[in-house]
């Protein structure tokens, strides 16, 4: 399998021939803004960041970085002290529409408002627009296996099999478990009526922690019928929730070829980094143009024939990260084929169950299963260095 190193976070030139806009500086806010910040800098923007982790590679590209000590409570205070500028949010903030509304008092938002977030993140509302698994908010649940899902979470955290224990419909809901292949798709919406399907991805799963998000592989080519069903999901969501700019749709493809929508992530997604690096499309500029002008690209530019695996590494126990750990990991796997991201500062304490870092693996192999297997082989090599990784 021939591997190629991902593009470093430098300036891209001719690939981003986009009509200039008035936006030359961008504030990015989220639990982890590194990927979004790097993408924006590649597209010629200056970036300020407010971030929960403040990893070393975020500080390399951002003009300023402010750390969130208490998420999301600190965010309005941190933004109020900054000069007025356009802003985008990444993962985590979609669960806190109130914080988004507060930031919007001092900074104009490029993205989905808090009001629309409250609707699109509601499974009861979503069920009126697209096909989702059977969802209940109280017992009895009915036959079959059910999952209990938190309403305000991300990355699969807090999902577990439902039992006979009662639950609060304000904090959780039950959803029938669908057997199949999980994945996601990245869309661009104009905020009015139209959407553009950009790319789709398979999710990386772990048998010992089946609902947590470990990463993605893509872009993938879906079968024609499935691909069309996936593309058709975007338009009703845009019309119902005024989705503007980039948004992600998590789905599961069952054994009969039916596509079930699981969740909407109305923001820059983890898979957007794969799309941005593989295709070298100006996703941030497209997002800005959609938000300011309600415009979508007339058509997608040429696609790459490469595929990328994005794999998040978690720790099974509390650790203190040291620079020597990364050096050992680089020696354990092929440093030429892997790029390390979301790198903590030396001396950082990382709690059990929390992410340690991410690696990206770019390949000319077009088989996602083969790339997945190769990726997990690298994880096994890393576990030989530190057994706490998974």
Image (spheres, grey):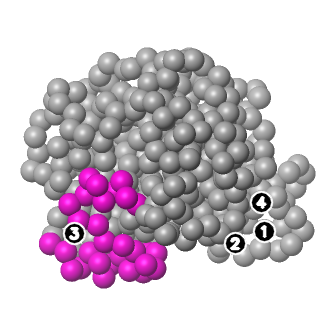
Query: Is residue 331 something one can see in this rendering?
Result: yes
In the rendered image, the vertical position of residue 364 relative to residue 312, given as above or below:
above
In-image side of 135 versus 196 (left or right): right
Where in the figure is residue 354, as x and y percent of width and height?
60, 63
SS of the residue under disc 1: loop
- Is residue 75 located in the magenta-colored stretch of the structure? yes
- Cα distance between the residues tagged 4 and 1: 16 Å
Q: Mark 2 or mark 1: name the one nearer the start of the chain.
A: 1
- Residues 278 and 94: in front is 278
User: Going from the N terminus, do you reach mark 2 or mark 4 first?
Assistant: 4
Q: What stretch is highlighted in magenta?
A: 55-83
Mark closest to the chain's N terminus, 1 or 3: 3
Q: Circle 4 is placed at which residue position?
A: 160
- Residue 138, numbered circle: 1
Pointer 3 with pointer 4, Cβ within 8 A: no
Distance CA(mark 3)–CA(mark 4): 38 Å
Indicate which disc, 2 or 3, sits on the residue closer to the N terminus: 3
- Name the residue nearer the viewer: 58 or 226: 58
């Amino acid at each position: 399998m021939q591997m190629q190193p991902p593009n470093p976070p430098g300036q891209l030139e001719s690939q981003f021939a986009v009509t200039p806009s008035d936006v030359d500086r961008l504030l990015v806010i989220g639990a982890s803004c590194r990927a979004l910040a790097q993408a924006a800098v590649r597209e010629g923007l200056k970036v300020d960041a407010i971030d929960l982790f403040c990893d070393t590679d975020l500080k390399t590209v951002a003009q300023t970085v402010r750390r969130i000590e208490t998420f999301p409570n600190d965010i309005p205070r941190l933004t109020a002290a900054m000069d007025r500028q356009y802003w985008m949010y990444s993962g985590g903030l979609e669960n806190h529409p109130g914080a988004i509304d507060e930031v919007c008092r001092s900074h104009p938002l490029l993205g989905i408002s808090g009001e629309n977030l409250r609707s699109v993140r509601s499974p009861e509302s979503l069920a009126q627009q697209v096909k989702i698994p059977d969802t209940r908010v109280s017992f009895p649940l009915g036959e079959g296996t059910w999952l209990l899902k938190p309403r305000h979470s991300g990355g699969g955290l807090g999902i577990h099999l439902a039992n006979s224990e009662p639950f609060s419909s304000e904090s959780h809901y039950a959803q029938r478990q669908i057997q199949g292949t999980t994945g996601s798709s990245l869309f661009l919406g104009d905020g009015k009526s139209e959407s553009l399907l950009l790319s789709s991805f398979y999710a990386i799963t772990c048998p010992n922690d089946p609902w947590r998000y470990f990463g993605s592989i893509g872009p993938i080519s879906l079968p024609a019928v499935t691909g069309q069903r996936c593309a058709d999901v975007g338009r009703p969501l845009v019309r119902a929730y005024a989705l503007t700019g980039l948004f992600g749709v998590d789905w599961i493809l069952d054994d009969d070829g039916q596509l079930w929508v699981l969740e909407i992530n109305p923001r820059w997604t983890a898979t957007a980094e794969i799309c941005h690096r593989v295709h070298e499309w100006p996703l941030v500029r497209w997002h800005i143009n959609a938000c300011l002008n309600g415009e979508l690209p007339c058509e997608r530019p040429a696609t790459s024939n490469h595929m990328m695996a994005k794999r998040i590494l978690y720790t099974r126990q509390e650790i203190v990260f040291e620079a020597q750990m990364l050096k050992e990991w680089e020696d354990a796997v092929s440093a030429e084929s892997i790029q390390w991201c979301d790198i903590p500062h030396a001396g950082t304490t990382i709690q059990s169950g929390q992410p340690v870092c991410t690696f990206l693996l770019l390949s000319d192999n077009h088989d996602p299963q083969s790339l997945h297997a190769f990726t997990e082989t690298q994880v096994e090599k890393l576990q030989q260095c530190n057994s706490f990784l998974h």
